Image (cartoon, rainbow, N blue to C red):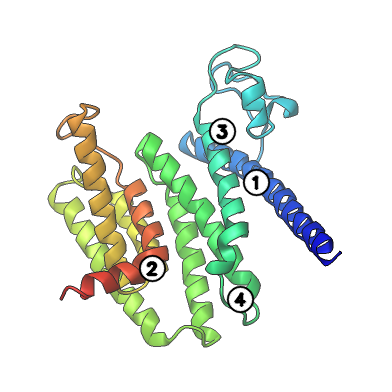
Amino acid sequence: MIITISAYHNVDIMATFIIISIALFFSGAAIGSFLNVVIHRSLSNESWVTGRSRCDHCRKKINWYDNIPLLSYLILRAKCRFCKKPISLTHPVVEFLVGSLFVWWYLFGTFFFTLTQRPFEVLQPVFWLAVGVILIAIFVTDYLYYIIPDMFVVLLLCLTIIYRISLVYFGIMQVNDLIMGIFGMVIAVSFIGSLWFFTKGRGMGFGDVKLMIPLSLLLGWPNTLVGLFLSFLIGGLVGGFLLLFKKRKFGQKIPFGPFLILGTFISLIYGDQILGWYLSFL
């Protein structure tokens, strides 16, 4: 009887996890759908606050049943109902990425969101979820359009400053750590900025320089150096791969923002281990 009850209990827990994960995935996909609207309308200088979604080709309004995240894309077979022209793959990709972020946040967040002091038991996971959504938006826009919108960078910077100051105010983060984080930001931004200046924008875009400001504050010191090193390492490997397989020509631009974000993501999770491994050789 004990085994039976335990088995039923485990099944209930698993079912609960699955239901919550599915609900969070589609909630995240819905936010991803809205994020698509923000991205495309911001780049075309349109208001994303008002107005119905329209087809990029025929400009006809999209009905609500054709605007269901992921499902409508599959049902319509990636084509507009009216003009039959292809729907950009960006839409389902962003929806899937944000939905997956929500599931990861739920399933694995307990390993990273360890603060229990009020209000950070809620503020910490919400903050990092918001950061993840913003970074996805920056990743996609820079990868597709070679643009890092100031709106996303400013929003990320404001959230990060407020969060870091809150940590200091409640005694969770030391003032010296914040000062060292600012010091790391100055070094990283100066380095990226010098590449932009001396190459006259050919080796590095100014959007990358601006993006490095909030990313450095997110990482703190010395993880900023780890994130920056990983960004150039990943960028160099991808660039070499593209040249080798003739997907890019020598001198042709490659967006660097996605590599900065990937380097930041890896450093946030494994930065201390990577730094410790490196220092062990000294």
Residue 11 sits in quarter: bottom right
Report crowding for label 3: few under 14, some 14 to 19, many 20 or more residues within 10 A (C-alpha): many
Question: Which circle's residue, 3 or 1, is located before the other in the chain?
Answer: 1
In terms of depth relative to the viewer, which is nearer, 274 or 173?
Answer: 274
Name the front one of labels 1 and 2.
1
Which residue type does callout 4 highlight? Phe
Is 225 positioned to the left or the right of 41 in the image?
left
* Residue 272: % across, % down: 35, 72
Secondary structure found at label 3: helix
Disc assigned to residue 106: none
Q: Residues within 10 Å of mark 1 (few under 14, many from 20)?
A: many
Dots 4, 1 in contact, CB < 8 A: no
Q: How far from the left and from the top, in percent, is residue 178?
A: 39, 80
Element under disc 2? helix
Q: Residue at 23% across / 57% down in the picture?
A: 192
Which quadrant, please, contains the N terminus?
A: bottom right
What kind of residue is marked 3? Pro
Q: Earlier in the sequence, mark 4 or mark 1?
A: 1
Alpha carbon of mark 4 to alpha carbon of mark 1: how far?
Answer: 24 Å
Q: Amino acid at mark 2?
A: Leu
Quickly name the residue at label 4. Answer: 120
Question: Which circle marks residue 25 in the picture?
Answer: 1
Give the residue type that dot 1 points to.
Answer: Phe
Q: Are marks 1 and 2 in contact (CB under 8 Å)?
A: no
Label disc, if present, on residue 219 of the rendered structure: 2
Identify which residue is drawn at 63% across, 24% down: 74
